[in-house]
Image (cartoon, helix red, strand yellow):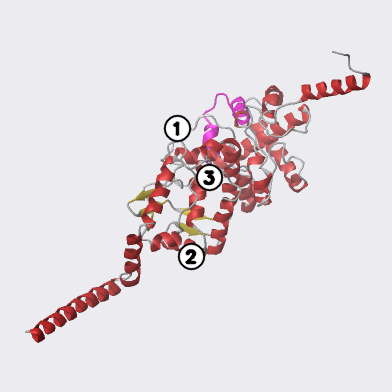
Amino acid sequence: MANPNPGEAAIIMKIKAKMEKALPLVTDECCIYRVPREIRKLKEDAYTPKVVSIGPFHHRDPNLQKMEGQKTIYFKEFIERTETKNLESFVSCVQELEAKVRDCYSDDIKLSEEEHVMVILVDCCFILEFLLKSYFNQWSSHDVFFLSPWLSNCLEYDLLMLENQVPFFVLEKLYNLAFPSTSNPSLLTLTYHILPRGIISGNRDGLSLTNVGRIAHFTDLTRKLLLLSSDLSISECSREAQVTHLYTATQLREAGVKFEVNKASNCLLDLQLSGHTLRIPFIRVEDSTEAVWRNLLAFEQCHWIDESYLADYIFIIDFLIDTDKDVDLLIEKGIIENWLGDSNAVATMFNGLAVNILTLGFNEKYSCILKGLNDFCEKPWNRKVATLKRDYCNTPWRTVASIAGIFLLILTLVQTIFSILQVVH
């Protein structure tokens, strides 16, 4: 083979250099992602922190710079409350983990090693100090979060945003380094204390935290707690064929389906179909509900697409709710508590959550529910019986009147028959 000319040789060298620098977009450690553009563009502010930046993705956001001073204060207070009070040991700890931490992010981090260590260390210590203050109610007069409930609420939801995470193993390392011998509550217990009650309400007192397993970050923890508190089989990964249709709540009611609150479970995911009764756990819809769900779904789309249990749930609720009439029906049945005030806003929210979300079929339990509902509604007799009940038996008085009318009709018919017989004879 002929030797390449000088021009070709230069090109070959540059290509080889480029190939050597080529790295995969994500590594096996990756767990913190930029929200995909097709999802993010639907509602930018749902994925953007409002009060504080955590980690490198939003580090230089000018809208979040006011909190940098407060983060430094909390960093200092955390170091002072530790048993060792040795800043050098904390810096050394994060330095050792820096490369592993960098691999946890889906984007190339545009920070030097030194800058990255400082960001991760300050942000993690800020979080730990906030968790300790919240758990022990140790607020002082200079704590802006204590003085402003709005700020405190925003901060808690900022800590759940997918792009605003630090790896949980760094928090654990620093927490254990800070308190190696005390009887402080576990980091998991501290974190559990601030998770959104609207999403995992009711199960936080009864759920064993020992079953959580490896935690990637706060968004991952919230999803894990939802799944652990549900009766879905997390170990069962088989997915049924994609279901593209389900009747709305009002259509289901017209076909004879009954709606009830599932009082046996406080987990949102525990849908149950018994006969023609669909039981749905209580849902409180408030201002922060949409942002929390959007970040959980975005994480699932990026990291758990083969086990998209949350997307399954949202798709079913999206099927059930099409208009404000569907929302009103579920409110009437005590399934939805609407803190947004407007039923249309609730319908718009649930319809919007499913846009640009993918699911590889439904989990087995939900597939059975969908098939059962569709089969029931597609039987003409069920719809006719439901129409009769709705039109003639929807109140006790109307039921009595309908029975009396039928009885009178029968008597009239019998009388007519006897009259005809008498004429014939």
Callout 1, which amino acid? Answer: Ser
Q: Quadrant of residue 346?
A: bottom right
Residue occupying image coordinates x 67% and y 25%: 100
Look at mark 2 in the image and give the residue it sits on: 325
Q: Amino acid at mark 2?
A: Lys
Which secondary structure, mark 3? helix
Q: Could you tell me which residue is drawn at 38 percent across and 48 percent down? A: 272
Q: Residue at x 55, y 24 (%)?
A: 181
Q: Is residue 117 left or right of residue 140?
A: right
**Would residue 174 be counted in the magenta stretch?**
yes
Residue 197 visible in the current orientation = no
Residue 123, percent from left and from top: 68, 36
> Dot 2: few (<14), some (14–19), or many (≥20) neighbours within 10 Å?
some
Residue 311 circle label: 3
Q: Quadrant of the N terminus?
A: top right
Is residue 181 rendered magenta in the image?
yes
